[in-house]
Image (cartoon, rainbow, N blue to C red):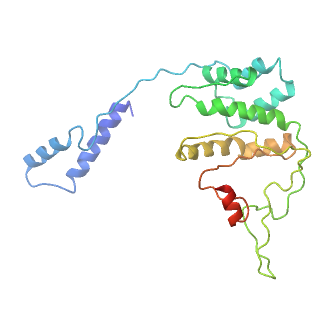
Amino acid sequence: MSNPLTLFDDLREMYLRYLDSPFDLRYPDLLTERRALLNTDGRLFRQPLIEPIPAYQSSNNTFQGIAQSLLGPSWSAADITDLANFVSLELFPPNRVPYAHQEQVFAESVVNGNDVIVTTGTGSGKTECFLLPIIAALVRESAGWGQTGPRDPCWDWWNHHQNQTSSKWLPRIPQRSHEDPAVRPLGMRAIILYPLNALVEDQLGRMRSILDSDNARGWLQAQRSGNRFYFGRYTGRTPVPGDRNSAKTSKLR
């Protein structure tokens, strides 16, 4: 594809040829007239509207360099290294340079502790703008978490198991039953609000890649004593935790 207009012309011609083939007419003049009627804005297509957007300004620095320069006065060298290494796994690989506004948001939110509003265009990396401060807080706090205990041999917490002898359903294994609240304080670290459920789907894929990929799990296993970063989606259709009963449903409502 040389440009968007060429792509538009090719697609338009493809659809017109498709209609000419199965709906052929005996008289060429009728074919020409039908083609002229269909080849009009508002029939099969609309003329493209193209909005030119200037390239977003680059920070001209890797995230590792940004973290070193901005966090050096307030963070320990070990925490900065951990943050840079974790972010480089998925969010900002070494060959991806943050935009200038992403660096500015990181400085204002993480370093200065200010609230930030980001109003850049589509594809400008707004997701990274709000994920970086969350990840920075998680990585820094998790450095003090203790070792997790051994998981249950049947750690498929998403399933209910049936006793082979009594045919009764056994209690579900909690996902985080192997953690010790004394060495990892319980609590919710961040809430991300979306106006529409549809917007969450793409974000969930990003979060799985960043926080729960093989690379992320490997790093957490080696650097955070087996602790993990957990996240969940909650909407009006989210079921109650554990077994559903009238009391839990009423509480949820």
Q: Quadrant of residue 175?
A: bottom right
Residue 56 placement (x, y as % from top left): 54, 21
Q: Quadrant of residue 118?
A: top right
Residue 214 lies left or right of residue 50; in this view the side is right
Residue 135 lies left or right of residue 179; in this view the side is left
Quadrant into which the C terminus falls? bottom right
Residue 215 placement (x, y as % from top left): 74, 43
Q: Is residue 252 visible?
A: yes
Q: Is residue 62 above or below residue 4?
A: above
Quadrant into which the N terminus falls? top left
Mark count:
0
Residue 140 placement (x, y as % from top left): 82, 32
Q: Is residue 203 above or below residue 105?
A: below
Closer to the camera in the image, 164 or 187:
187
Residue lying at 79% horizontally and 21% vertically, measured from the top left: 71
Q: Is residue 64 above or below residue 191?
A: above
